[in-house]
Amino acid sequence: MTTNDTSPSRRRRAASMADVARHAGVSSQTVSRVSNGLTNVDETTRERVLASMRAVGYRPNGAARALKYGRFHTIGVIMFTLETLGNVRTLDAIATEAAIADYSVTLMPVPDPTMGAVRGAYRRLTEQAVDGIIIIFEASLLDRVEITLPPGLPVVVIDSNAGSGYTVVDTDQALGARLATQHLLDLGHRQVWHIAGPTSSFSAMHRVESWQRTLDEAGVAPPDPHHGDWSTESGYRIGLELGARDDVTAVFAANDQMALGAMRAFHELGRSIPGDVSVVGFDDMDEARAFWPPLTSVHQHFREVGRVAMARLLSQIADPSAGGGTTLIPTELVVRDSSGPAPR
């Protein structure tokens, strides 16, 4: 009869540092130096030790190294939603940059945008042994305007309303909205209507404020913004309302999805784009050039936001005094066929 003996005595023993030392013909101290990435080892010896690690199946104990050297090579990311294009692309960039720097990423979703929820996520991440935290805000905090977290870990916030004392990295939302609005004014449109994002969104409100300010500076009284929820359907609904008005000749939408919905509404109402109505979006998603007509849109460099955020966090991990300040990543207007001169 055959039996499966899984007792500890029958299990294969995990390879140890001593096994690597015997295989490579070096001391255990040399294996330790190689395992911990120290530089005081001859390169030929280092390669021999690494080859022996692979040969015997030795895996360095990352947790033990972290306790010894104070580094876990893991960062935490707190975020409210993965439903928006910007958040997904920014998170992808953070993960890519973290991998390049030999860091892992622990994602901590927050179900509701409150300071208590953020603190809870922060506490759970500290218990999971991370070296620093990036917080990606999409929505305004419902209970406080500014972030207040316990001291102890380096923090980078991807938003521009984090309050003093935090390192902030963000897209220049105001610049993008100004470029979009001014572009339509320069084309001769007497008014620019705005399909805004939800009032709970920091980025949406930054765009609203900049759109209003640009119109004010041009001597144009801003109309009330029409708030959507970032979806194509909300853009379509608002587009039906705006498209029914003959005086609406220029529309700036706070994201490309709402712009697409509005364009569908305008087509259904028999209003040509850009002959009757010019449309400008925001994000410059990959599909924007495939809209009909191709969509003029504000390009956001999401990868650069993620790269800079990770770089700033690593700087703080290495030197806690390196924190603070705001870095804005410029936006740019990509002009395509959906915007044109005001109708005569």
Image: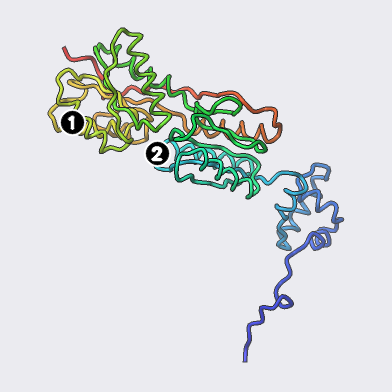
Q: Residues within 10 Å of mark 1 (few under 14, many from 20)?
A: some
Q: Secondary structure at mark 2?
A: loop
Query: Residue at image x 59%, y 41%?
Result: 98
**The C terminus, quarter of image:** top left
Identify residue type, mark 1: Leu
Residue 279 drawn above or below residue 47:
above
Direction left: furthest residue? 270
- Going by the image, does 95 lie left or right of 224? right
Query: Residue at image x 81%, y 58%?
Result: 24
Residue for badge 2: 84
Instruction: Place residue 58 in its image quadrant.
Output: bottom right
Q: Position of residue 78 (x, y in %)?
A: 53, 41
Q: Residues within 10 Å of mark 2 (few under 14, many from 20)?
A: few
Q: CA distance from mark 1 to mark 2?
A: 24 Å
Identify residue type, mark 2: Thr
Relative depth, front residue between 215 and 65: 215
- Going by the image, does 149 lie left or right of 49? left
Relative depth, front residue between 196 and 123: 123
Query: Residue at image x 61%, y 32%?
Result: 311
Q: Position of residue 336 (x, y in %)?
A: 30, 24
Query: Residue at image x 70%, y 74%?
Result: 11
Direction bottom: furthest residue? 1
Residue for badge 1: 240
Q: Secondary structure at mark 1?
A: helix
Q: Position of residue 277 (x, y in %)?
A: 20, 22
- Going by the image, does 119 lie left or right of 213? right
Relative depth, front residue between 41 and 271: 271
Mark number for residue 324? none
Relative depth, front residue between 28 and 264: 264
Mark closer to the chain start, 1 or 2? 2
Residue 130 drawn above or below residue 195:
below
* Circles 1, 2 touching at the beta carbon (< 8 Å): no
